[in-house]
């Protein structure tokens, strides 16, 4: 009798262990998302094992109802232990199929990350808006400073309008331009000419300061006009330009850049002398040297007229 009880207890524990294993399999299948057909197969295997255990128990003196209660209690305990993993939601009384639904607790780390990302996005947006507003303020300040500087410069600059120019100043400037269009003048020579026209000192100063003449070019123009009318040595041309009130540097600029051939100028001067009077060779050479030609240039001139 005791051996039978031991054997029955052994089979009972084996059956309980089998049930636990089967329940574990159900949990795994439920977590892996198996379909209802696999659940039905597992449920049928449970029923078969339960029926085999009940047949064994019928041969013993242990009451089936008591064994069934023990198994149900064990199943409840196992279900309680795996409640955090799977929970039965629906029991079909006709097919004895149990459908498990896995419940997932909200992932707090994901929520924290999402909230952190949202905070970062908000912070970035705020920083971008602040930086853009700072740039706008800087550009406004720069534009304001530029406007202030321009206004200060405008205030400092002398306000010259046409209303402040007198009729005499306008006429003096117009007269000076007309003289320079006709002939070449030095600065002093042009002032003397305007004085001869009886303009006032203020009117003449206005004309000279606003005519924008290049006095070196005026000296060169005057030198060329002299060479077109008469013969000059390099020295005598400079003296003539200085007589016209050009400065020494301006006179030298005119003589250096007029393009004259001084030998030819000596020959031209010798011919003009021989047309008006008679000269010996030495007398002609001396006269040409008196005009500022060099000895070689004077000899070249005398030779050009037959000496």
Image (cartoon, rainbow, N blue to C red):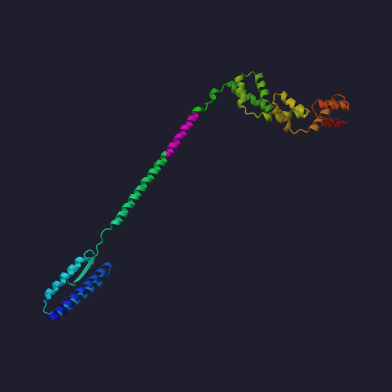
Q: Which quadrant of the structure image shows residue 90?
A: bottom left
Which quadrant of the rendered structure holds the N terminus?
bottom left
Q: Can the viewer see residue 88?
A: no
Give the image location of residue 17, x and y in percent: 21, 74
Along the viewing direction, whichever of 29 and 163 lies nearer the viewer: 29
The residue positioned 18% from the left and 70% from the top of the image is: 75
User: Within the magenta stretch, is there residue 251?
Assistant: no
Magenta stretch in the rendered image: 138-154
Along the viewing direction, whichever of 263 and 1 lies nearer the viewer: 1
Give the image location of residue 258, x and y in percent: 73, 32
User: Within the magenta stretch, is there residue 151?
Assistant: yes
Q: Is residue 138 left or right of residue 237?
A: left
Which quadrant of the rendered structure holds the C terminus?
top right
The residue positioned 54% from the left and 23% from the top of the image is: 164
Q: Is residue 60 left or right of residue 98?
A: left
Give the image location of residue 292, x and y in percent: 79, 27
Q: Is residue 183 left or right of residue 155?
A: right
Give the image location of residue 59, x and y in percent: 13, 81
Main SS class of the magenta portion in the image: helix
The residue positioned 18% from the left and 68% from the top of the image is: 77
Q: Is residue 115 left or right of residue 217?
A: left
Q: Which quadrant of the structure image shows residue 108?
A: bottom left
Along the viewing direction, whichever of 228 and 133 lies nearer the viewer: 133
Q: Which quadrant of the structure image shows residue 96?
A: bottom left
Count of labels in the image: 0
Q: Can the viewer see residue 178?
A: yes
Along the viewing direction, whichever of 112 and 182 lies nearer the viewer: 112
């Amino acid at each position: 009798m005791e051996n039978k009880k031991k054997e029955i207890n052994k089979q009972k524990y084996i059956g309980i262990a089998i049930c636990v294993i089967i329940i574990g399999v159900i949990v795994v299948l439920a977590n892996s998302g198996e379909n209802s057909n696999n659940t039905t197969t597992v449920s049928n295997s449970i029923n078969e094992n339960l029926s085999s255990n009940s047949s064994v128990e019928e041969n013993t003196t242990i009451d089936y109802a008591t064994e069934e209660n023990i198994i149900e209690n064990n199943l409840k305990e196992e279900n309680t232990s795996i409640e955090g993993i799977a929970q039965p939601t629906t029991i079909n009384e006709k097919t004895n199929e149990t459908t498990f639904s896995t419940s997932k607790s909200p992932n707090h780390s994901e929520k924290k990350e999402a909230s952190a990302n949202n905070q970062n996005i908000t912070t970035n947006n705020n920083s971008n808006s602040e930086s853009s507003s700072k740039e706008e303020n800087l550009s406004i300040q720069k534009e304001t400073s530029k406007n202030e500087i321009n206004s200060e410069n405008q205030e400092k600059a002398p306000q010259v309008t046409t209303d402040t120019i007198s009729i005499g100043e306008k006429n003096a400037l117009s007269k000076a331009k007309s003289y320079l269009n006709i002939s070449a003048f030095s600065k002093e020579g042009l002032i003397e000419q305007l004085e001869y026209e009886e303009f006032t000192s203020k009117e003449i100063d206005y004309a000279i300061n606003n005519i924008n003449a290049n006095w070196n070019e005026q000296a060169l123009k005057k030198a060329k006009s002299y060479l077109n009318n008469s013969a000059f040595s390099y020295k005598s041309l400079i003296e003539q330009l200085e007589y016209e009130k050009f400065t020494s540097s301006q006179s030298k600029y005119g003589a250096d850049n007029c393009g004259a051939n001084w030998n030819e100028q000596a020959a031209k001067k010798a011919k003009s002398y021989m047309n008006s009077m008679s000269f010996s060779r030495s007398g002609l050479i001396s006269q040409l040297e008196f005009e500022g030609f060099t000895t070689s240039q004077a000899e070249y001139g005398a030779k050009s007229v037959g000496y």
